[in-house]
Amino acid sequence: MKKYRIIAICLIAGFLAVNGWAEQSATKDECVIKCHEAAAMITSKGLDAAIKEVSNPKGMFVWKDSYVFLMNLDGKMLAHPFKPELTKQEHVLLMTDPTDKALFVHFVNLARKVGHGWVEYMWPKPGKNTPSKKLTYIYRVPNQDLFVGAGVYVGGMIY
């Protein structure tokens, strides 16, 4: 009987650990929602207010293991909560991921041509240095030369 209790406790602990981990991973739906919320903030409160909020690592556009960033169609990073040094560059178009993918060129082209969609590339998780596979949603702010993005890290569960 004691053996069954130990097995049951282990199963419950494992279930709770998996559920706790899953709750820490952003979903694709959350990325779409957060991008639309950020675009709405730009439209309603202005670009300066949105840059301030998107740049804030403890702000409303940072959640679980994801965050929103903001760029213009010229390839200038306007706001990034975890890599503010990217905003100091004239543009980030020449940057590539470890597979030589010009991810920011893909972002800009998608925003220009379609207005929204997903791009897969390699990027470090917040607080890490090692790149992981990431799938990012890009959404062009209506009637502006701006777009926002937010992504999920691939390898865990993707919803």
Image: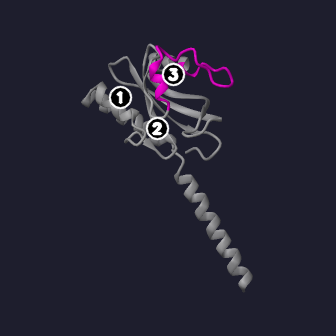
Q: Earlier in the sequence, mark 2 or mark 1?
A: 1
Above-or-below relation of 80 to 2: above
**Location of mark 2 (residue):** 67
Q: What residue type is labelled 1?
A: Ile
Q: What residue type is labelled 2?
A: Tyr
**Location of mark 1 (residue):** 51
The residue positioned 44% from the left and 13% from the top of the image is 74
Q: Are marks 2 and 3 in contact (CB under 8 Å)?
A: no
Which of these two is toward me, 85 or 74? 85
Question: In the rendered view, does 7 fall on the left or right side of 116?
Answer: right
The residue positioned 53% from the left and 20% from the top of the image is 104
The magenta stretch spans residue 139: no
Residue count near mark 1 (Cα–Cα under 10 Å), binned few <14, some 14–19, many ≥20: many
The residue positioned 57% from the left and 22% from the top of the image is 103
Q: Distance between the residues labelled 2 and 3?
A: 16 Å
Which of these two is toward me, 81 or 101? 81
**Location of mark 3 (residue):** 107
Residue count near mark 2 (Cα–Cα under 10 Å), binned few <14, some 14–19, many ≥20: many
For label 2, the SS is strand
Which of these two is toward me, 15 or 47? 47
Which residue range is magenta in the image?
83-104
Instruction: Residue 40: give x, y in percent of width and height.
Output: 31, 32
